[in-house]
Amino acid sequence: MESMDEGILREFLSESLENAEQVERELVALEREPGDLKRIATLFRAVHSIKGTCGFFGFTKLAAVAHAGENLLGRLRSGERTLTPEIANALLALVDALRAILGRIEATKEEGDEAFEPLIDRLNQLDTAAAAPAQATVPAPANDVRLDTEGGATAPAESSVRVDVHLLDRLMNLVGELVLARNQLLLEVASSNFVDLPATAQRLNYVTTELQEQVMKTRMQPIGALWNKLPRLTRDVAAACGKSVRLDLEGTETELDRSIIEAMRDPITHLIRNAIDHGIETRAERAAHGKPEEGRLLLRAFHEGGKVHVELTDDGAGLPIERIRESALRQNLISTARAALLTDREWANVIFLPGFSTAEQVTNVSGRGVGMDVVKNNVERIGGAIDVESRPGQGVTVRIRIPLTLAIVPALIVTAGGERYAIPQANLTELIRVEPSEAADRLPLAFDAPVLRYRDGLLPLLDLRDILHTPSARHGEHGDEAVSIAVLHADDVTVGLVVDAIVASQEIVVKPLIEQLRQIAIFAGATILGDGAVALILDVPGLARHAGISVRSGVPGVPVEAILSEAPSAPLRTLVLCHAGERWTIAIPQEQIARLEEIPRRSVERIGERAMVQYRGGILPLVSLGAILDLKGAREAADAEWLGERDPLPVVVHERDGRSVGLVVESIVEIVAERAAVSASPGARAGFAGSMVVRGSVTELLDLEKLLGSSPVGRDLAPAHAGWGA
């Protein structure tokens, strides 16, 4: 084998692995349409091609395995055999064997010592057995079901790419132009004739930019290269779970960088496993709810806003929000105070917290308390973001947004503690310079924490020198020095990063970190600058996590004047700001709110003059807050016009003694923390506790207990809510 032409061998390995992957795809599709003779013929040709080519290289073990599979496929092609789950499992085991042998050949140039006689005997027995009647094509769980896609068998495909000839011609022309520009530059330097140097440098810059763009195109691949193996994964995991699941793929031609495709392999694999194991119901459960027995997964990709969007949707039962809430509280992942403020949408995203799991037992598919947080970290590591939306009884959609490429990215170069660092411009919102004369007003302290007055709110500040533990003057001690701040965002987190200086914006080539630095969450990679120095690339989500900044505290709009000016003796109160009719802002104490919800209009039902919605296994009465306050005749709650055009409806859920009522508001503005004292308001409406200063404005404080007890609309809810007094 030492004398074998390496190029011919690589071509054989690449082509053979492509054939094996085609067999896997077509076989999984054939299980749904067992009578498709065209697919059977395609399967036969692919295996026959592998067998015929390997004879040239003397790979006898590979030829024997392929020959046994070819014989069985020949029986299917001639109609002497009918595809059964047993035959399908055996042929999929054949694919695994082909991959294993090809991987060994790629690594060692030899077939290895692994024995495949049991598989060959199994294929031969199925070939010679009496023809069996057609059986259900849903694969039954089997001992040899494959639940992962790891193994060196994928090495041949990952070591090469196919490039369009026209693109290669363009690259060759650009390389020629680059050589000419280099020669001209060297000649001018040697002759000390620098008159034409600017024009030569400009030409060199143009050619280099063009070459960069064309080379990046060679790395762009359709995402289908990653997705081709997912139907097999879906089939195997569904079989192990005793379920029937179909995977549909859309947008497989969507292109993105090869490195991004590889980075997405594990997250997508885990999401599919999770959807099948936790999301899609068993055949019996689906039938009981009037659903088709076969579950459906839809994986689609598309370009939008300069990024690739990947969505995985299942038609299962949706996320068990109550179990998520109970599990998160039991594991102390969410505080009781914060739990009362989360909407169902926010509870759904709790599944991404480290260590979270609702599984009651560990299986070979999931339930180890690790996974979804790793998925989120892997997506964020490549500059992406992930979000989940649950529809009770209808399914779950996971949305991922990722950049097109990681190889070369635009970045902002900053300095801190005498060193230079790179910030991806995808995470950059704006740059702010605070002059010394403005520092006292724009850079106050809120509860001993540095903040920036940013638009209409306060923005948490991080000092990069503090994070890196380099000697520096802390915020508030800059004296006559102007402060440079980079406002950064990642997903829903916004934060201000204080740096020593902002150097320049430039495109950087991303290099991976050495193993010792990969464990540091605040770094995403490294790059080499124009002067040869190495600069570390900052990971913005990692910075936020390192500083303990959450989504809720990181967004602009944190209360300003009250937090800064009120005496510490005033009690700290958490309030929910809502708009009632006519955009009138009111505050509701957090302790009086059980949940904040968004309820689709189609879910609202009418029972007589009352509006109701099926909610958490019971019935939730709905009433307009404007109707209770009797704003502009909104008292006529029997008329559904108070719902307006809003969809979904923002609802504040109030509970007492196990009974609930939903107050429909115009909008839910935000949640704030205030130390302002409550003052009595002469002539205030019934149901209000007084007024307080919130975000620099006088705001009326609502008391839901008094409101529901004193309002005619509130009393109309009796007897369900009898006992709510003034």
Image (spheres, rainbow, N blue to C red):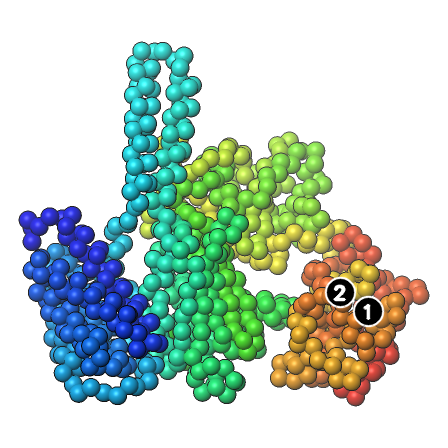
How dense is the environment of label 2, judged by Cα within 10 Å: few (below 14), some, or many (20 and up)?
A: many
- The kind of secondary structure element at disc 1 is helix
Judge whether 33 appears above or below 410 on screen: below
Q: Residue at x 25, y 59 (%)?
A: 18
Of 648 and 546, nearer the camera is 648
Q: Residue at x 53, y 65 (%)?
A: 388
Q: Residue at x 61, y 50 (%)?
A: 460
Label placed on residue 626: 1
Of 143 and 312, nearer the camera is 312
> Picture quarter containing residue 726?
bottom right
Q: Residue at label 2? A: 666
**Three-letter residue code for mark 1:** Gly
**Three-letter residue code for mark 2:** Glu
Q: Estimate the x, y position of residue 400 in percent, counting from the top left.
A: 48, 59
Judge whether 223 appears above or below 333 on screen: above
- In whole angstroms, how far apart are the C-alphas of marks 2 and 1? 9 Å
Judge whether 208 appears above or below 366 on screen: above
Visible residue check, residue 576: no
Q: Residue at x 25, y 50 (%)?
A: 160
Visible residue check, residue 699: yes
